[in-house]
Image (cartoon, coloured by chain):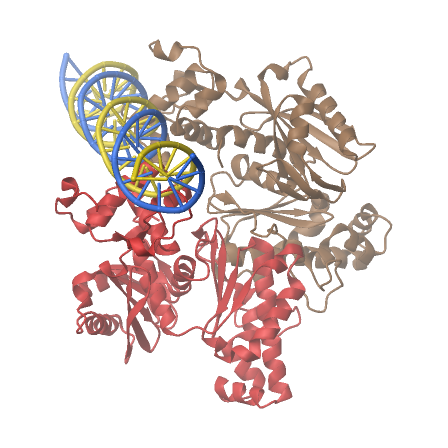
Chain colours: A red, B brown, C blue, D yellow
Amino acid sequence: MVAVDFRGMVPVDDDAVLAASPAAAAILTALVTSGPQSRVTLARKLGLSSAAVTKAARPLINAGYLSELDATERTGPGAGRPASPLMVRADREFFAGVKLTGDELIGVVCDLTAQVHAVAHRPLASSSVDDVLAEIAALVAELLDGPQNYRERTRRLGLAVSGDVDRESGLVRYSPFLRWHNVRLGKLAAAATGLAVTVENDVKALTTAEHWFGEGAGADSFALVTVGVGIGCGLVVNGRPVSGSHGVAGEIGHLSVDASGPQCHCGSRGCVEAIAGTSYIVAAAGTPTIEAAVDLARDGDPTVGAVFARAGEAIGLGIAAVANLVGPARIVVSGEGLSAYDLFEPHIRAGFERQAFGAAVDCPLSIRPLPFEEWARGAAAVSIQSRLVPLA
Amino acid sequence: MVAVDFRGMVPVDDDAVLAASPAAAAILTALVTSGPQSRVTLARKLGLSSAAVTKAARPLINAGYLSELDATERTGPGAGRPASPLMVRADREFFAGVKLTGDELIGVVCDLTAQVHAVAHRPLASSSVDDVLAEIAALVAELLDGPQNYRERTRRLGLAVSGDVDRESGLVRYSPFLRWHNVRLGKLAAAATGLAVTVENDVKALTTAEHWFGEGAGADSFALVTVGVGIGCGLVVNGRPVSGSHGVAGEIGHLSVDASGPQCHCGSRGCVEAIAGTSYIVAAAGTPTIEAAVDLARDGDPTVGAVFARAGEAIGLGIAAVANLVGPARIVVSGEGLSAYDLFEPHIRAGFERQAFGAAVDCPLSIRPLPFEEWARGAAAVSIQSRLVPLA
DNA sequence: ACCATTAATTAACTTCGTCAAGTATTGATT
DNA sequence: AATCAATACTTGACGAAGTTAATTAATGGT
């Protein structure tokens, strides 16, 4: 039985709970990303005294963000008082996430641990800023105002957009598929929805989701490679995402792997994207669509099969370059292109293993297709992160 | 005239001065790396109040690490009280640095700002651990016990070794040229010299030196490419050096830039090192030594000239890969291979500009030869850093 | 002579942690 | 059953290291 702490019972402004102490944010972050843990374990991991954890956790418990596991669920080591691990009450707060593409919006509602609770789609008839904002507002309303009434526990919305995005200011400098230039999407969407909005590049958002809530959880360095129309790469190094000083980073698609390879739209030759990008595969296969190329390859067409083999190998070489240069703890390969997973996978591994230098071959490689709503979950993950780490 | 502060006059243990406060270490670091600055400027840069700077700076002044610029040197902006910038007394403390190669030791003495005050060389007859330790001790004695008597203000020694080094423990896991395996060089050298020893990989040490005291000063991200027998790369991302989770990072030499290029000793084809490494250049030029190849190329031999052109271009492609992937604020290209600076430079730039994607071409590229003692200065720089940032 | 302006210092206060001591809850030993 | 060792958690006193606001200092312009 826990004694009632009257100081903690003072009504608490939600946002003030985390601002209250740096330790509170650290504790909540550790629990969200690494699951239930005792105070002692948290103290060791965060470099704090257990007294500090006790103190910082109390307001979080009182505010409904944390609870203790039931006595029955305790996992005592043997002797001594068993721990009562702290766990996140995931449904204390929800977060909306929306991925913007040129012709569609995908939206999700996630809880504090980035579990998806609801999904919704919405076609985009026009990519004018006003129309997109109206559709975002409608999609968010559809997600939040259903029977579950997520609305009352949702304060934040994350948006993921491809292109050049400044997360701090919520400015979309340039987005190719929407054909936007310098749109203050953060402010506009906040006005349209009444939520606190975070805007992030889509690949970086997905990388963040995977780094906090997926296979990259807890890793100090991590890379996510996306395969599709473009070949992209999100990087986490020294525990933080890599942005690139001149606005360029993770451009794995424009590494040249073959000096005499095909011409790329960037002006160079033999870029990974010019070998493995969807439109280049379609052109090389001589089919009208990528689906047709996939079908031919699966039916055993040797010419089209070789196109996929070459593409997979080029991706593998690009991944090896990442491993050789930054040495991430692990690499995840995903993206809509991997719907043709079976055609790519062995060749990606072969290319990687051929070019990875020394111990870099030990870098674990996960290759798997990606549900498309995962992009929206990435947007929500960025929003969760902005809640837990006000300044990072 | 500054009033005497009696509290500050209490005798201070040297090492305690920095341990005294995090702010003190931050201030000294900022002054060492960015030159003299007023307290107000420091406060802004470090995110502190000017009151905090005043307080933290006083013990450093009393201990002789800082002083104020003379009134005559003050650079007042116009109105208001002119600032009295703080500056480091560089000769308050000295640091020894030694670079180990397979057949030679190069040693330097540096002050707090990494200015070289003395240089000495020493051939290595044997690379047995005991012999090398004896030579290190003799070299350090030669450097420190001269007429200047650096000894009395030197407590630390940095060692730079090529290969796989664990800086934390001072362990040399493997060093190819010395043919060492698991040598506890840190402890051994500390016993042999009586100094506190830091051991670091040579490329990382040089990167550190350039990041703190050279062209990379103050940059959040930075890359140093070394050209020589091997082609190496040190990276700083998110303000910290990149180590690589599996012990591999910065292996720019084993990026493949030409699928049909020459066979590399790593097993792959077309690696940058297999085109631009010294021994491969000698082989391609068909000359007995690299000097002979350089001479022929400078005399206008078109075949050998083309070898250097191709090598430079391969290096440029590798650098473009770094720029495209991690987007460093700037890149420095150096190393003993650049004694043939004139033969490489335009081709490195051409390769870089061809393959750099989008705004990555804006990344400033410094290409310059490197005095060989610079490697030893890198070792000293690591030692300085270990003094200023006890835990980093 | 006075004022606006910027720099540096000082003292009171706030924040956020640690430390050391005590309480709580278990398994093992007598 | 009583006690003990072990481990987890809590508590209150304390201390480190910053902040804010007021004060002092030094300059150029009017």
Corner quadrant of residue A125: bottom left
Question: Could you say which quadrant of the image residue B301 lies in?
Answer: bottom right
In the depicted view, which residue is nearer to us: B195 or B356?
Answer: B195
Residue at the far right: name it: B288
Q: Quadrant of residue B58?
A: top left
Q: Is residue B256 above or below residue B13?
A: below
Q: Position of residue B307 (x, y in %)?
A: 76, 58
Q: Where's the N terminus of chain B, which quadrant?
A: top left
Q: Is residue A310 left or right of residue A227?
A: right
Residue sitting at 67 percent across and 33 percent down? Answer: B185
Q: Nearer the viewer, residue B127 or B378?
A: B127
Residue B252 at x, y = what percent?
A: 63, 54
Q: In the rendered view, does B331 fall on the left or right side of B187? A: left
Q: Is residue B247 visible?
A: yes
Does residue B101 lie above or below B115 as drawn?
below
Q: Is residue B70 above or below residue B170?
A: above
Q: Residue at x 29, y 49 (%)?
A: A390
Position of A323 with respect to B43 (left or right) is right
D24 relative position to A317: left or right: left
Whole-percent x, y for residue A24 in the image: 29, 45
Instruction: Name the foreground residue: A64 vs A155.
Output: A64
**In the image shown, does A117 or B158 lie closer to the viewer?**
A117
Q: Is residue B257 visible?
A: no
